[in-house]
Image (cartoon, helix red, strand yellow):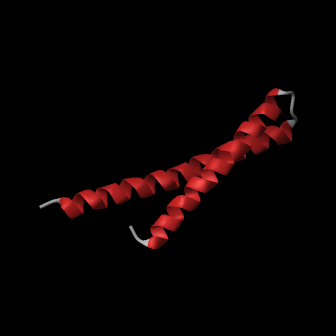
Amino acid sequence: MSRRTLVILWSAVAASVFLLGGVVSSFRWALAGGRVADLVVLVLGGLALAGSLFVAGRIVLVAARLGRRARWP
Protein backbone atom coordinates (compact mmCIF):
# COMPACT_ATOMS: atom_id res chain seq x y z
CA MET A 1 0.00 0.00 0.00
CA SER A 2 1.23 3.47 -0.74
CA ARG A 3 1.91 5.99 1.98
CA ARG A 4 -1.04 8.13 0.83
CA THR A 5 -3.43 5.18 1.11
CA LEU A 6 -2.21 4.41 4.62
CA VAL A 7 -2.73 8.02 5.69
CA ILE A 8 -6.27 8.03 4.33
CA LEU A 9 -7.03 4.68 5.96
CA TRP A 10 -5.81 5.68 9.41
CA SER A 11 -7.49 9.08 9.12
CA ALA A 12 -10.80 7.34 8.40
CA VAL A 13 -10.26 4.97 11.34
CA ALA A 14 -9.43 7.87 13.69
CA ALA A 15 -12.47 9.80 12.49
CA SER A 16 -14.63 6.73 13.10
CA VAL A 17 -13.39 6.44 16.68
CA PHE A 18 -14.07 10.10 17.43
CA LEU A 19 -17.47 10.00 15.74
CA LEU A 20 -18.41 6.86 17.66
CA GLY A 21 -17.74 8.71 20.91
CA GLY A 22 -19.86 11.63 19.74
CA VAL A 23 -22.72 9.36 18.68
CA VAL A 24 -22.71 7.52 22.01
CA SER A 25 -22.67 10.81 23.90
CA SER A 26 -25.49 12.24 21.77
CA PHE A 27 -27.49 9.05 22.24
CA ARG A 28 -27.20 9.35 26.01
CA TRP A 29 -28.26 13.00 25.89
CA ALA A 30 -31.23 12.13 23.68
CA LEU A 31 -32.34 9.36 26.04
CA ALA A 32 -32.06 11.69 29.02
CA GLY A 33 -34.76 13.94 27.59
CA GLY A 34 -32.72 15.95 25.13
CA ARG A 35 -34.06 18.49 22.70
CA VAL A 36 -34.48 18.29 18.94
CA ALA A 37 -30.94 19.60 18.44
CA ASP A 38 -29.58 16.54 20.25
CA LEU A 39 -31.43 14.26 17.86
CA VAL A 40 -30.12 16.19 14.88
CA VAL A 41 -26.55 15.86 16.16
CA LEU A 42 -27.16 12.15 16.74
CA VAL A 43 -28.42 11.59 13.18
CA LEU A 44 -25.64 13.63 11.57
CA GLY A 45 -23.00 11.91 13.69
CA GLY A 46 -24.41 8.51 12.76
CA LEU A 47 -24.32 9.36 9.05
CA ALA A 48 -20.76 10.66 9.30
CA LEU A 49 -19.75 7.52 11.22
CA ALA A 50 -21.26 5.31 8.54
CA GLY A 51 -19.41 7.27 5.85
CA SER A 52 -16.02 7.06 7.54
CA LEU A 53 -16.47 3.34 8.20
CA PHE A 54 -17.39 2.86 4.54
CA VAL A 55 -14.21 4.63 3.43
CA ALA A 56 -12.00 2.58 5.76
CA GLY A 57 -13.70 -0.68 4.79
CA ARG A 58 -13.47 0.06 1.09
CA ILE A 59 -9.73 0.74 1.36
CA VAL A 60 -9.21 -2.57 3.16
CA LEU A 61 -11.24 -4.49 0.56
CA VAL A 62 -9.39 -2.94 -2.38
CA ALA A 63 -6.01 -3.53 -0.73
CA ALA A 64 -6.90 -7.17 -0.11
CA ARG A 65 -8.04 -7.60 -3.71
CA LEU A 66 -4.81 -6.10 -5.02
CA GLY A 67 -2.81 -8.34 -2.71
CA ARG A 68 -4.57 -11.43 -4.01
CA ARG A 69 -3.99 -10.39 -7.62
CA ALA A 70 -0.31 -9.81 -6.95
CA ARG A 71 0.06 -13.37 -5.64
CA TRP A 72 -2.01 -14.94 -8.44
CA PRO A 73 0.23 -16.99 -10.76
The quarter in which the C terminus is drawn is: bottom left
- Residue reaching furthest to the bottom: 3
Q: Residue at x 64, y 46 (%)?
A: 47
- Residue reaching furthest to the left: 73
Quadrant in which residue 10 is drawn? bottom right
Image spot of residue 63 (x, y percent): 36, 59
Quadrant in which residue 64 is drawn? bottom left
Q: Residue at x 63, y 55 (%)?
A: 15
Along the viewing direction, whichever of 2 and 36 lies nearer the viewer: 2
The quarter in which the N terminus is drawn is: bottom left
- Residue reaching furthest to the top: 32
Q: Is residue 42 left or right of residue 61?
A: right
User: Eyeballing the image, is 35 above or below 66?
Assistant: above
Along the viewing direction, whichever of 14 and 41 lies nearer the viewer: 14
Q: Is residue 9 left or right of residue 21?
A: left
Q: Residue at x 76, y 38 (%)?
A: 25
Q: Is residue 27 left or right of residue 36?
A: left
User: Eyeballing the image, is 11 above or below 44?
Assistant: below
User: Eyeballing the image, is 57 above or below 37?
Assistant: below
Image spot of residue 69 (x, y percent): 22, 60
- Residue 43 shows up from this direction: no
Image spot of residue 12 (x, y percent): 56, 57
